Image (cartoon, rainbow, N blue to C red):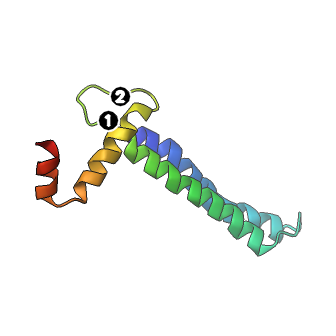
Amino acid sequence: MARRIFFTAGIPTILGMSVFVVSYIIVTKNIAEIPPSSTIAISALFFLLGLAGLSFGILSASWDKEPGSFFGIENIPMNIQRAKAAFKPATQNFEDKS
């Protein structure tokens, strides 16, 4: 899970922060004129990609003793069911299993 989260959330988040640094360097060195709205939009896209990657990393986690597959896609439906069950009252979860 941590490895997936690093690649799917960490890298886009680092890129989102580096957009500001690269944009600042480009503007201060007079290489190009970049509108601030473009910098914010590109950075926001990377941060949204990181948020989606964080969600994917959490939902694709395998809670079994043996490790899951590389992408962990087979664990997503089961983890979504577990997340839905967590928001139901405990009596409702007990009745669903009976």
Query: Which residue in the structure is indicated by mark 1?
Result: 62
Q: Say which of 94 and 46 sits in front.
A: 94
Q: Position of residue 43 (x, y in %)?
A: 65, 63
The three-letter amino acid code for the residue at tag 2 is: Gly
Q: Residue at x 30, y 53 (%)?
A: 84
Q: Say which of 52 and 95 sits in front.
A: 95
Q: Is residue 45 above or below residue 81?
A: below
SS class, disc 2:
loop
Question: Which residue lies most toward the bottom here?
Answer: 36
Image side of residue 83 versus residue 24, left or right:
left
Q: Crowding near pointer 1: few (<14 within 10 Å), some, many (20+)?
A: some
Q: Position of residue 34 (x, y in %)?
A: 83, 69
Query: Which residue in the structure is indicated by mark 2?
Result: 68
Q: Residue at x 10, y 42 (%)?
A: 98
Image side of residue 93 versus residue 69, left or right:
left
Q: Is residue 77 above or below residue 68?
A: below
Which mark, by number, is residue 77?
Answer: none
**Spatial distance from mark 2 to mark 1, Cα to Cα?**
6 Å
The three-letter amino acid code for the residue at tag 1 is: Ser
Q: Residue at x 44, y 34 (%)?
A: 73
Instruction: Decide if residue 89 is in sight here.
Output: yes
Residue 90 lies in quadrant: bottom left
Q: Position of residue 38 (x, y in %)?
A: 76, 68
Whether the residues at callouts 2 and 1 have beta carbons within 8 Å, the answer is yes
